[in-house]
Image: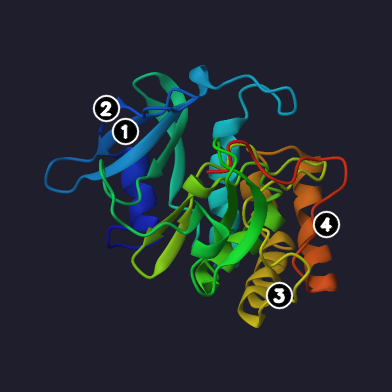
Amino acid sequence: MPTGTGADLEELLTHGELTPVGRIQGSSNGALLCFVGDPADEVLAIHKPEMTERRLWDYPDGTLVARERAAWLVSEAGGFDVVPPTVLREGPRGHGSVQLWVGSVGEDDTPPLVDVVTPGEVPDGWLVVLEGESPLGEPVVVAHCGEPALRTVAVLDAALNNSDRKGSHVLRDGAAVRGCDHGVSLGVEPKLRTVLWGWAGEPLPDADLARLERLATALGADLPDALEPLLTPAEVDALTHRVAMLLRRRRHPLPAPGWPAIPWPAL
């Protein structure tokens, strides 16, 4: 990400001039790529207008951009450093979220964190999540790398109840790993749906337990006030309960029965 503190970037994203560059190809919610700020101090950001949100059967209309902001607040409160700075503001198509863009624009030769490969091509240290067949009937697997930074994303997803962690939603950012697209997170009912099941049932690392402890402390202090305009009281209570359960069990969750474990498409 660009240099500067989270507060500096939050200020720039909130008040900097928003200049659309173009629509994000393939976005289901009319997302726009924008420059934010003046030419001497501008960054790239993704703007998701509330007015173009896709209607979903399991989330209230007009709440997805608020969940994007809430996910950043949760990530920051726990010290996960996963979600890029995200604000709510007026844009060229009305109210919506603005999130700092991570990575390059256009072709990207960065090695993926999640991939579909044949069973014999799984890189050392990678974890297989799903077995299947290619369109030609050849065996393939969905696998992800075992890096600690990606594991931290999986822990945050469990706290957020993220129901759409596709492989394309995790991005390398130097030595860090960022996660984007959290609009379908933070519901009350268990809906964890992810490609990062490689650690399912394993003990949580000490560093991630410390992040959860920090998040639990924030939830017992000022964080609920910051989340109040973004989530319902029941959703904040459910977040608090999930964090407490993760700390009590000290293990990565297992897929929940009665709910698809893998998003579609997986990547």
- For marks 3 and 4, give the one nearer the viewer: 3
Q: Amino acid at mark 4?
A: His
Spatial separation of the CA atoms under disc 3 and disc 4: 17 Å
- For marks 2 and 3, give the one nearer the viewer: 3
Which circle's residue, 3 or 1, is located before the other in the chain? 1
The quadrant where residue 60 appears: top right
Disc 1: which residue: 33
Q: In this image, 205 relative to 22: left or right? A: right
Which circle's residue, 3 or 4, is located before the other in the chain? 3
The quadrant where residue 172 appears: bottom left
Q: In this image, 110 relative to 263: left or right? A: left
| Residue at the image position 66 percent from the left and 57 percent from the top | 129
Q: In which quadrant is the N terminus drawn? A: bottom left
Disc 4: which residue: 241
Q: In this image, 223 relative to 95: left or right? A: right
Assign a secondary structure to mark 1: strand
- Residue 22 drawn at (x, y percent): 28, 26
Q: Amino acid at mark 2?
A: Pro
Spatial separation of the CA atoms under disc 1 and disc 4: 36 Å
Assign a secondary structure to mark 2: strand
Assign a secondary structure to mark 3: loop
Which circle's residue, 1 or 4, is located before the other in the chain? 1
Circle 2/circle 1 CB separation < 8 Å:
yes
Which circle's residue, 4 or 2, is located before the other in the chain? 2
Which circle's residue, 2 or 3, is located before the other in the chain? 2
Spatial separation of the CA atoms under disc 2 and disc 3: 41 Å
